[in-house]
């Protein structure tokens, strides 16, 4: 087998430690067929595009600065491109078992259908190697053939809010960081839906619908009575049941207490991001519409006239 040249591209914050480098140095791959480009900046999609312009590899492999790759990762990537006509090859962003407690709980939550629906494959090993869509691929463990990458124009830099730059283990610092991240994900998802409506995209609006339901529940109570509580009760039972299942499966009973809270934060903040961006997009659209229909404010000045009495 002829090993393709792989260009590993890592966006990084200025001065930040690039934890991915030691594992790349230890990778079992011919050194002459491997190059690593670290691009510093504050906009990951822009950094990735700039690095891709400088790359000379046949395959572009995108990581985050704290991604840790297994020794055989590059060989496995190369093998997929060798035996198939695949344009894109990627895998999940997994959280190690020695990570802090909160980090693992977040990963467990996102690895369920309740936490991330079809996107759970981004955060957990689900099934075998198979054809996938953007709902399963994540930007911090993603490779593409270089010619394919440029054929589609590279990363959309205007979708930064939904560009997968934050690994789940970066969220371990605090619940506030998790909330901010999923608020950004919600805004980014709405932008993506507006620009390129994905197949099955309506399901991602469910958190926003849930928030609207909660806001209208006092009025609904007058009409439906106690039946108004049925959707919320169903959600709570589902969240608690999944939490108990995860706690028993992972032998971490303590996570049963925090997982329902994590599910709530993920969905509320994601839904709030969707609603916030909907209002922002609607305001911008209304402004553009008014600009097109507003009557001209230009004033035509008439020439001065002088009247003379006879």
Image (cartoon, helix red, strand yellow):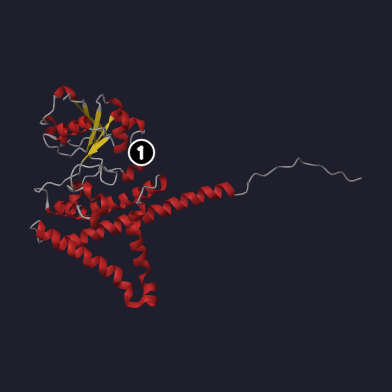
Q: In the structure shown, which secondary structural element does the residue marked by tag 1 occupy?
A: loop
Q: Considering the image in quadrants, where does the C terminus appear?
A: top right
Tell me: residue 211, above or below residue 165. Answer: below
Residue at the (21%, 61%) spot, across then down: 261
In the figure, is residue 18 to the left or right of 190?
A: left
Q: Nearer the viewer, residue 22 or 210?
A: 210
Q: Nearer the viewer, residue 291 or 98?
A: 98
Any part of residue 42 in sight? no
**Mark 1 neighbour density, 10 Å: few (under 14) some (14–19) many (20 or more):** few
Residue 52 x %, y %: 29, 29
Q: Nearer the viewer, residue 90 or 49?
A: 90
Residue 259 x %, y %: 18, 60
Any part of residue 44 in sight? yes
Residue at the (11%, 30%) spot, across then down: 28
Residue 134 x %, y %: 29, 44
Which residue was labeled with disc 1? 156
Which residue is farthest top?
A: 32
Choose top left, top right, bottom left or bottom right for residue 64.
Answer: top left
Choose top left, top right, bottom left or bottom right for residue 145.
Answer: top left
In the figure, is residue 294 to the left or right of 98?
A: right
Residue 127 x %, y %: 18, 47
Q: Nearer the viewer, residue 129 or 215?
A: 129
């Amino acid at each position: 087998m002829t090993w393709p040249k792989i260009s590993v591209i890592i966006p990084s914050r200025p001065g930040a430690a690039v934890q991915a480098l030691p594992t790349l140095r230890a990778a079992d791959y011919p050194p002459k067929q491997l190059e690593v480009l670290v691009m510093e900046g504050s906009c990951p999609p822009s950094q990735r595009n700039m690095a891709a312009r400088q790359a000379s590899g046949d395959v572009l492999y995108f990581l985050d600065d704290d991604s840790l790759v297994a020794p055989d990762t590059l060989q496995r990537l190369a093998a997929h491109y060798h035996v198939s006509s695949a344009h894109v090859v990627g895998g999940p962003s997994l959280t190690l078992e020695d990570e802090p407690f909160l980090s693992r709980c977040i990963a467990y939550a996102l690895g369920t259908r309740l936490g991330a629906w079809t996107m759970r494959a981004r955060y957990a090993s689900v099934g075998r190697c198979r054809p996938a869509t953007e709902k399963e691929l994540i930007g911090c463990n993603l490779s593409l053939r270089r010619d394919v990458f440029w054929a589609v124009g590279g990363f959309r830099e205007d979708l930064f809010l939904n560009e997968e730059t934050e690994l789940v283990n970066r969220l371990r610092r605090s619940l506030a960081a998790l909330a901010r991240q999923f608020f950004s994900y919600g805004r980014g998802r709405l932008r993506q839906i507006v620009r390129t409506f994905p197949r099955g995209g309506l399901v991602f609006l469910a958190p926003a619908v849930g928030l609207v339901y909660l806001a209208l529940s006092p009025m609904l109570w007058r009409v439906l009575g106690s039946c108004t509580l049925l959707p919320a009760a169903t959600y709570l039972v589902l969240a608690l049941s999944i939490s108990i299942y995860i706690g028993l499966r992972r032998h971490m009973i303590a996570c049963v207490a925090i997982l329902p809270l994590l599910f709530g934060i993920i969905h509320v903040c994601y839904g709030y991001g969707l609603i916030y961006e909907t209002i922002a997009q609607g305001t911008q659209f209304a402004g553009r519409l008014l600009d097109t229909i507003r009557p001209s404010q230009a004033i035509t000045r008439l020439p001065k006239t002088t009247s003379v009495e006879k």
